[in-house]
Structure formats: C-alpha cells, structure tokens
C-alpha cells in the first residue's frame, strides 16, 4: 500500500500539535507529566504547539495525505537552532502547575542528546483509531530515504517498549534508558544511514 506524504506549513501547527497530543495521551510518561486526566490532552497540545511551531521554522513536519499521522524532525547539524521564542513563559502558560515536570523532561532530553550530526525525530504520532495500519512506517520510510541518500544518521527517544521495538525494526539501536522521577523509561535510539 502506497501512502502519500505531504510537507506541512505553519498553518497546520495546531492540527499537528493536536494529533500528537491525542496519540500521546495514553503514554505512561504523560500520566506523570499531567496527573489530571481531565486536563492531560489540552496541556499536552499546548506544549506540543510550541515545539511544532518551532519545527515549522527550524525543522521538517510531514503528514500522511489524510493527516491521520504526523512526523516532526529537527536537523541537528552544525550550529544549533535557537530555542523557541519566549519558551519559558509560553511553557508556563501551557503547562501551568506541571511546568516543572516539563522542564525536568527537557533537561533529561538535553542531557542524553547525542552530539554528532543527525536528524532528530521529535514526534511520530498516529491518530489512535488508525494505529497499526502502516502510517507511521510510511512516514519513517519517507524520511529515512532522504537520510540514507545523504549519509545522515537519525536519533529519537522511544517512550514505550512498543515504540522501541517498532523503531528497532526500522534500524534504530536502543541505548540505556533514562527515566523520569516515577521510573518511566525513555530509550535513546540511533540509526546509522543504510548503504554507507
């Protein structure tokens, strides 16, 4: 089955952030980030909107043609991109009483991020009702084609054993997990370009 992939622009920021929040609400780590289940998806969407908006300027945002699955990549090559504008104030506005938890997670990500040039898959999300239908795989294959052609590694943080195993099937190797304070793990994963 061939899946059409589109590159998205700034007008799609809210849609992409909402799609990621909808898919990630069930992840174990989001229960630690936002303990109040009634507010979880809205808080996550607000946080993701900051990061997706940043990716629209400094990264690559792809989606399936039906917008049921999205991928957000940040090239980490040469000089790092500046942080999102007014990040601390916007994070506090989006995350409220749980801002310190999101800051802690940012610090963990930064401490475990590799230094060699690579493209960082910040988010890969598929609408819950469409998961397991190959949409995420199509998005990975689309960008991996470019990475392989250009000899560029890929990096990501897998937030569940299920996603870790999915990414392993696509050539990523898991490192030692790092954990948020409640013990929930993230696996840093690295993929060397194929054919090099």
Image (cartoon, helix red, strand yellow):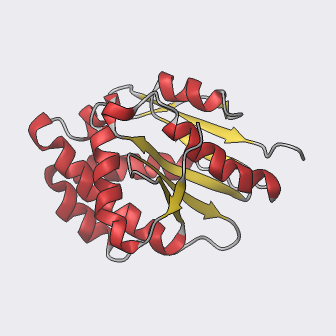
Task: Tell me: residue 76, above or below residue 177.
Answer: below
On the image, the x and y values in percent for residue 45 come to 25, 53
| Snapshot quadrant of residue 119 | bottom right
Extreme-right residue of the structure: 196
Is 61 left or right of 142, judged from the image as shown? left
The residue sitting at 62% across, 63% down in the picture is 75
The percent coordinates of residue 171 (x first, y second) are 71, 34
Q: Residue at x 56, y 61 (%)?
A: 74
Answer left or right for 110 relative to 46.
right
Quarter location, residue 172: top right
- x then y, percent, for residue 158: 51, 35
Along the line of sight, the residue nearer the viewer: 68 or 98: 68
| Residue 3 makes an appearance in the image | yes
Quadrant placement of the N terminus = top right
**Which of the 4 quarters of the picture holds residue 85?**
bottom left
* Farthest left residue in view: 38
Instruction: Give coordinates of residue 153: x percent, y percent.
Output: 74, 50
On screen, residue 123 versus residue 42, left or right, reads: right
Q: Is residue 181 visible?
A: no
Badge count: 0
Please report the residue visible at 24 percent of the width from the left and 70 percent of the height from the top. 89
Depth check, front residue: 36 or 129: 129
């Amino acid at each position: 089955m061939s899946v059409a992939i589109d590159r998205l622009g700034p007008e799609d920021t809210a849609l992409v952030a909402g799609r990621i929040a909808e898919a990630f609400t069930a992840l174990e780590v989001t229960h630690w980030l936002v303990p109040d289940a009634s507010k979880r998806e809205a808080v996550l969407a607000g946080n993701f909107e900051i990061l997706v908006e940043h990716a629209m300027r400094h990264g690559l945002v792809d989606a399936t043609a039906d917008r049921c699955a999205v991928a957000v990549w940040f090239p980490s090559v040469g000089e790092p991109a500046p942080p999102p504008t007014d990040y601390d104030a916007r994070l506090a506005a989006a995350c409220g009483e749980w801002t310190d938890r999101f800051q802690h997670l940012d610090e963990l990500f930064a401490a475990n991020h590799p230094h060699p040039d690579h493209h960082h898959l910040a988010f890969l999300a598929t609408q819950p009702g469409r998961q397991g239908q190959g949409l995420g795989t199509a998005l990975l294959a689309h960008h991996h084609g470019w990475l392989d052609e250009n000899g560029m590694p890929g990096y990501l943080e897998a937030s569940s054993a299920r996603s870790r195993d999915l990414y392993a099937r696509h050539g990523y190797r898991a490192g030692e997990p790092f954990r948020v304070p409640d013990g929930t793990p993230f696996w840093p994963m690295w993929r060397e370009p194929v054919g090099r």
